[in-house]
Amino acid sequence: MNILASVKTAPTAKEVLEAATRQRRFNMKKLLSDLQNSYPPLRKAVQAFEPELGERLSRKLASALIRNSFLIEAVLKRGGATKMLARWELEPHDPRYAPFEACDTIFQALANNMKPLLGSKWKNVLTAFLKHPAVPYELPVDYLDPSASPLHSAQNIGLFIHDAAAYKTIALRSFLLSGVSLSADVERCNPAVFPGWGDIVRSLAEATGTSDNLRVWISVWNRIFSKVKTKSYLTDRAQTGEYKTNREKRWETHPHSPQFATRKQCMRIEFKLLNQALNFEGFPSSLLDCLVQSGVAARESVVCPITLDPFSFTAFAQEAVSPQHGLSNHHIGHLVPLKSGHERNGKHTADNISWISEDGNRIQGPLTLSETRALLRRIWSNYKSAGLL
C-alpha cells in the first residue's frame, strides 16, 4: 500500500470557497475559519489588522474582504431567492463572472489598501462601516466603471472612503443609529439634551416602553433605517422583463438591469432619505440646526411630490415604533419608475427617489411624476368644467 497516496490532501482556498457555497445555509464564520488554513493572504491580513482593530473587528473586516472579493449573492432563476456563489460559478459570459485568480488579486489589493487607513484619521470611518453596516459585510469599495466587462476586476474596483458624500452619509448614519458621532462637531448635537426631542419621546413612551431620550432616539432611527436601507441598497422584486431581481445588492445585479446601481449611488440615496426625514415637520429645529452646522445634514423643504402635503415627524416616528402590517403613510418611491425596456426608464439615483405619502403612492401607480401631475391637472380641469369645483 502506498502510504503517501492515502494521505488526504488539504483543500485549496478555491475548493473551500466552493464547498461553502454548496451548503444549504451559507456560514461566513465557518468559511473564515476554514480559509485561515488554506489561504495565506487571509492570515497575513488578519495579523496586520489586529494591532489596530482588535480580534473582533479584524475578523469582521477580513470577512467583508472575502465577501466582496470572492462571492456574489445572485438570483439565478425567475421567482427565486438570492444564492451565495463564488464569482467563477456564474456563467463565463456574465460580466460579473471572475476566475479565482482575479478574485485573489482583488482581495490582496483591497487588504493592502486597508492597512494604511488603520493608522490614520480614516480608521474611525472604516470602523463605522463595520459597526453599522447597511448590508452585511459592507465596505466602502465600488466599481470604477459600471459598464466595464469584466466588471469584477482589480483594475475596476477602488476604495471611496475619502469621498465627501460617503463620509457625510456614514457620519450621519452612525449618529442616528447610536448617538455616537465620528467628530466632536456632531457630538454636541446630543438628542438627550436638546429641547423638542423630549416632547416626541413623551408621545412615544407607551410604544417604546421607555422615557429615556437617547434610547428612544436609537429605537426610532434604527427602525427608520431598516426601511431606508432596503430601499437604498436592495433591488425591487422584479419578476418581469429581461432581468429578474429579488432583493439583490444593487451592485451585484446584472449591470444592464435598470435595478443596478453602484454603492456610491446607493449611499447618496441613503443620505437623501435620512436627511429628508430630519426635515419633516415637527423634528426639533434646534437639533436640525446643530446637525446642519456640524456638516452632516442640510435644510430642505420636504413634501410629498404628488400631493404636496407635508410629512409629520411625530406621526412618522409613531409609525416606525408601532407598525401596522399593510398600513403606512410613508413610502419610498422612484419619481420615474425603474422598468426594463421602458422608454421612460428611470435610474436608481438620489434625484429620482423620495419619500411619498400613501395617497401620493396610490395616485402615482406606475406613472412618472410628470405624467402623474399631468393627470391631476386634467382631472382638475374636468371637475372645473363640470362645475364641481
Image (cartoon, rainbow, N blue to C red):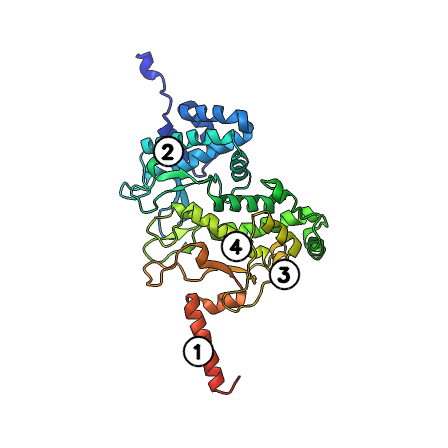
Query: Residue 367 in the image: x percent, y percent?
Result: 41, 67
Asked whether 257 or 143 is in front, the reply is: 143
Q: Which mark is residue 106?
A: 2
Q: Amino acid at mark 1?
A: Arg
Which residue, as the protein is rendered here, is positioned at the far left?
93
For label 2, the SS is: helix
Q: CA distance from mark 1 to mark 4?
A: 30 Å
Q: Amino acid at mark 4?
A: Leu
Q: Which mark is residue 315?
A: 3
**Res 180 seen here:** no
Q: CA distance from mark 4 to mark 2?
A: 32 Å
Q: Which mark is residue 273?
A: 4
Q: Is residue 164 left or right of residue 341?
A: right
The nearer-to-camera label among 3 and 4 is: 4
Query: Residue 3 in the image: x percent, y percent?
Result: 33, 12
User: Which one is earlier in the sequence, the residue at label 2 or at label 1?
Assistant: 2
Q: CA distance from mark 1 to mark 3?
A: 32 Å
Q: Amino acid at mark 2?
A: Ile
Q: Which quadrant holds residue 152?
A: top left
Q: Is 387 placed above or below 316 here?
A: below
Residue wearing tag 1: 378
Q: CA distance from mark 2 to mark 1?
A: 55 Å
Q: Residue at x 60, y 42 (%)?
A: 181
